[in-house]
Image (cartoon, rainbow, N blue to C red):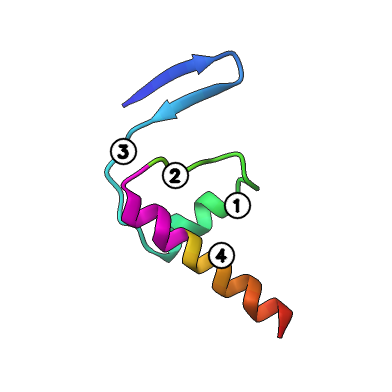
Amino acid sequence: MTSVCDMASFLVQAEVYAGPTFFGWVFGFGGKVKILGPEHVKEQYRQMILEAYGDLMD
């Protein structure tokens, strides 16, 4: 389901497999896409970002 929020944004509600391909797709938008829920998927994405950042700092 897709709905318009304003002239610059919209909301998409979809059932997806929250795996590496999905997270790569989200990351590819450079911060312009937000995962609003469920909370465990948001946390999984956050952990992947933190791990990637940590690898860059080693």
- Tell me the residue that label 1 is attached to: 28
Residues at circles 1 and 3 in contact by the CB criterion of under 8 Å: no
Relative vertical location of residue 40 with respect to residue 47 in this rendering, above or below: above
Instruction: Give the spatial CA distance, label 2 vs label 3.
Output: 11 Å
Q: Earlier in the sequence, mark 4 or mark 3?
A: 3
Residue 56 is left or right of residue 23, and the answer is: right
Residues at circles 4 and 3 in contact by the CB criterion of under 8 Å: no
Q: Earlier in the sequence, mark 2 or mark 3?
A: 3
Q: Amino acid at mark 3?
A: Ala
Question: Which image quarter holds the N terminus?
Answer: top left
Instruction: Give the spatial CA distance, label 2 vs label 4.
Output: 13 Å
Secondary structure state at the residue bearing disc 4: helix
Question: Local crowd at mark 3 within 10 Å, few (<14), some, or many (≥20)?
Answer: few
> At which x and y percent is residue 41?
36, 55
Q: Earlier in the sequence, mark 4 or mark 1?
A: 1
Q: Amino acid at mark 4?
A: Ile
- Residue 44, by quadrant, is bottom left
Q: Residue at x 37, y 63 (%)?
A: 19
Relative vertical location of residue 47 with respect to residue 55 in this rendering, above or below: above
Question: Local crowd at mark 1 within 10 Å, few (<14), some, or many (≥20)?
Answer: few
Secondary structure state at the residue bearing disc 1: loop
Mark toward the viewer: 2 or 1: 2
- Tell me the residue that label 2 is attached to: 35
Q: Main secondary structure of the magenta part?
A: helix
Mark toward the viewer: 4 or 1: 4
In the rendered structure, find residue 49 and report the number of the disc placed on it. 4
Q: Residue at x 33, y 33 (%)?
A: 13
- Tell me the residue that label 3 is attached to: 14
The magenta-colored residue range is 37-45
Q: Amino acid at mark 1?
A: Gly
